[in-house]
Image: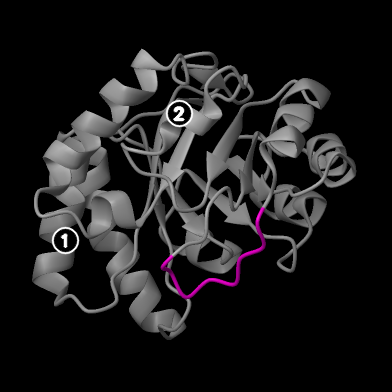
Amino acid sequence: MKFDTGLYFITNSTGYTEEEFLRRVEQALAGGVTLLQLREKEKSTRDYIALAEKIHDIARRYGVPMIIDDRVDVALAVDAEGVHVGAEDMPVATARKLLGGRKIIGATAKTVTRAKEACEQGADYLGVGAIYPTTTKVKTVLTSTDTLCAICKAVPIPVNAIGGLNRDNLDILAGIPIAGICVVSAIMQADDPGRAAAELKARARELGLYGKFTLKTVTNQTINFS
């Protein structure tokens, strides 16, 4: 499976009707998002699956892989392209055993040791942060750019910066060999999510933060969104 972590959009449906949420996600995809993560911390399993099926239909139309946050069961239920596991979630090795080699598995890492461990267990990419304080309800601990840089140099898989990033504060990442950026509020809460996505991608390219691992391949599977 091929995937590009360059502009990784993590959703947050809090405060939106389902119709408005779906509309915003589609606008973001149209604006150039390359990888999409559906993150729902409070929905029941049934509701999570129902929403994931709708989001997956939209993502397929734009040829963008959909990652499910944490819930391997939900990822399996909707045949998502992958799952992301945090430090307190299911171990990467267990997720890989359940999902097999054809799915994308991402992991959160805040130290070089954790990054190497996740990579050895079969992670395909890493999310490292938070670089800045965030407005999401997810518990965050700040990560220095020095640590981010060290992690990038320690593992052979894509590393994305995450946490409070927006078009105006990406400069702090210049010169660090990340594969891309992960954003939530900068797109989700924008007046125009599509425009916000396009501007973020353009700014990331200006700073050389985009494209180093474009179309990373997981095993030899060809993803089919038809």
> Splitting the image into 4 quarters, where does residue 63 fall?
top left
Amino acid type of the residue that numbered disc 1 sits on in the rendered structure:
Leu
Instruction: State whether residue 64 is above or below residue 138.
Output: above
Instruction: State whether residue 19 is above or below residue 25.
Output: below
Q: Residue 145's x, y, as percent? A: 67, 36
* Magenta stretch encompasses residue 169: no
**Residue drawn 59% across and 64% down?**
70
Give the crowd class for mark 2: few <14, some 14-19, many >=20 residues within 10 Å.
some
Q: Residue 67's x, y, as percent? A: 46, 49
Q: Residue 149's x, y, as percent? A: 71, 28
* Magenta stretch encompasses residue 140: yes
- For label 1, the SS is helix
166 or 35: nearer the eye?
166
Instruction: State whether residue 162 is above or below residue 216.
Output: below
Tell me if residue 44 can be seen: yes
Give the crowd class for mark 1: few <14, some 14-19, many >=20 residues within 10 Å.
some
Question: Between marks 2 and 1, how big is the CA–CA gap?
Answer: 31 Å
Q: Which residue is mark 2?
A: 171
Q: Residue 140's x, y, as percent? A: 61, 65
Tell me if residue 63 can be seen: no
Amino acid type of the residue that numbered disc 2 sits on in the rendered structure:
Asp
The segment highlighted magenta reads 135-142
Q: On residue 22, which mark appears?
A: 1
Q: State which quarter of the image contains the C terminus.
A: top left
**Residue drawn 38% across and 24% down?**
204
- For label 2, the SS is helix
**Residue drawn 21% across and 30% down?**
199
58 or 212: nearer the eye?
212
> Splitting the image into 4 quarters, where does residue 52 fall?
bottom left
Q: On residue 86, which mark appears?
A: none
